[in-house]
Structure formats: C-alpha cells, structure tokens
Amino acid sequence: MPAALVHTLRLPSGLLLELAEQGGLGGPTVLMLHGVTDSWRSFEPVLPFVDPAWHVIALSLRGHGASSKPADGYTPAHMAGDVAQFIAAMELPPVVVVGHSMGATVALRLAVDHPGCVRAVAGLGTFASFRDKSDLVDWVRSTIDPLADPVPRELADEFQRSTLAQSVTGEGEFSVSEALIGSMTDQSLKAPARVWRRGFAGLLDDDVADGLHRVRVPVLLLHGGRDAFVPAADLTRLTAALPQAQAHTWAGAGHAMHWEQPARFAALLGDFVGALDRPGAPATEDATCSTS
C-alpha cells in the first residue's frame, strides 16, 4: 500500500488540522483519533494493515502534532466540535470513528453531540471516567499542573512507556521497538506544556458518560487485560450505558494495544467494520453532520 498522504486542512473556525490519508473512496470512511499528547502518528503502525479499500484518515487534534495550538479549547467537547467541522468540511459520509484513550472519549462525545457525523465508534483504552482514578488525578496534580516549557523528554518518554503492558524489548508477543517509543515521544514533545496541562484538565472535567444512553450507533470497546490506566470496571460501566456496545478484553495487552499488536488490532477493527453492512446489522440513521 502506498504511504499515507500527510497534509493539512483549515477549518471554518480558522483552526489548521494535520491529517494522514490513505485508501480508496469506495469503502467505508474510518477516522482515527489519538490519545493525549500523541498525534496522527499514533496510528502509523496500524495503517499498513487496514483494508486498502477503506478511506482512512488519521487526525492530529488541536494542540497536537502539526495542528494549530490555540490558547484554550482542550476539552473533549471542543475537540469533538473540531472533528464535526472537519467531517463537514471534507464532505465525508458518516464515519467510523476509532479512538484511543482521549481519542475514544472524543469519539463518544462526537456521537453524543453530533450524531449525524458518526456511523460507528471503536474505542481502545476507553475511560468511563477520568476523575475517579485517584492515582491519575494525583499524578496530574503533582506532575502535569506545574509543567512548564520545555517539556522534559524524560517525562514524555516515561509517559509513553507507561501505556505498554511490558517493557520495551523489541521481542515477544506484545513487543514495541525503541524506535516506535522514540517516535511517539517526539510527538508528545510537539505539544507545549500548556497543551499537556489543559488537555489533562479537560479530561478530568469531562462528563460524557452522562450522555452515552443517546449513542444509537454500534460501539466496539477494546480493553487490554494489562491496561495500567483503565480498569475492567470501566468496560462494564460503558457496556451497560451504551445501547449497542460490544466489548472485547485483549488478554496480555496494555493501554496502547494498537502499538503492541497493530495487525491484530486492524483485524479486529476489520471484523467490526465489515459487520456494519451485513444483513441484520443495525441501520444507520440518515442524518447530516451538524457542526452546531
């Protein structure tokens, strides 16, 4: 498959978003959203394994990668509004939104606030809530809230490694190379300290769980059995709250399972997307992607 085309799009709001785009226009449109301080490159390991007929777009959300870095607007609701503008500006059909961690929260927020934009949601490492994780809250208060530029590389490196089930060895079933961790650390350092601070603050203040009963599209929830951030109880809460949710626990995987086993992740995603058009699949409502 040819390499993804990396370019930018300016939204009506003036925000510039970086994206990587690949595939045909005859298949489904799949939009991929990364976690906090990452960029579109979070899904770079996955892109070679997805169906070449899909129109795949991996997006760098505001404040991340080479996208605009405004002074504020780092809540999931703000980011979901950007994504709705992006879908409308690109004149895309309702998309299958794939989100990792923060990106999964943004994907669910998009489905709640802009339902006409979404055909289905696939979330990996999806939080039911951030504010009830005392260790995470303490880390944000002690380490992220005082953060100033330049962001220490040691912090970014440690943060990226913490998303994995195992240490970085480049060997074994769930191996991740040092080169990949170095690349992801580089991406984290493209986010200035204020984006780290406001991005995490936006997640701690998020209340998307209150609206999940309104999500009427199929949702796939992938959870790593060794996820150090998201407990299994969150998967139970999300599955109970979402009317059309299916859950899959990936034994041995960590929070960044799409880095640890990108081919397997792409295969699971392929099964989910392929089922959307099978006889008996839930119908997608005919709606327009609203940016309001």
Image (cartoon, helix red, strand yellow):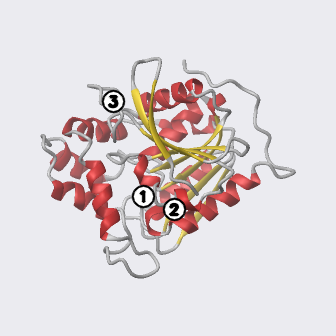
**Residue 90 pos. (x, y %):** 58, 28
Q: Nearer the viewer, residue 8 or 263?
A: 8
Name the mark nearer the viewer: 3 or 1: 3
Q: Are marks 1 and 2 in contact (CB under 8 Å)?
A: yes
Q: Nearer the viewer, residue 79 or 68?
A: 68
The residue carrying mark 3 is 68
The residue carrying mark 1 is 230
| Sooner in the amino-acid sequence: mark 3 or mark 1 | 3
**Residue 180 pos. (x, y %):** 35, 63
Furthest-front residue in view?
A: 2
For mark 2, give the secondary structure.
strand
Q: In this rendering, is residue 103 above or below 275?
A: above
The residue carrying mark 2 is 223
| Sooner in the amino-acid sequence: mark 1 or mark 2 | 2
* Residue visible at 27% across and 35% down in the picture: 198
Query: What type is the residue that disc 1 sits on?
Result: Val
Residue 139 in view, yes or no: yes
**Residue 136 pos. (x, y %):** 29, 52
| Sooner in the amino-acid sequence: mark 3 or mark 2 | 3
Question: Which quadrant would the C terminus be assigned to in this image?
Answer: top right
For mark 1, give the secondary structure.
loop
Q: Are marks 3 and 1 in contact (CB under 8 Å)?
A: no
Q: How many marks?
A: 3
Q: Nearer the viewer, residue 220 or 58?
A: 58
Name the side, left or right, on which 213 lies relative to 84.
right
Q: In this rendering, is residue 206 above or below 176?
A: above
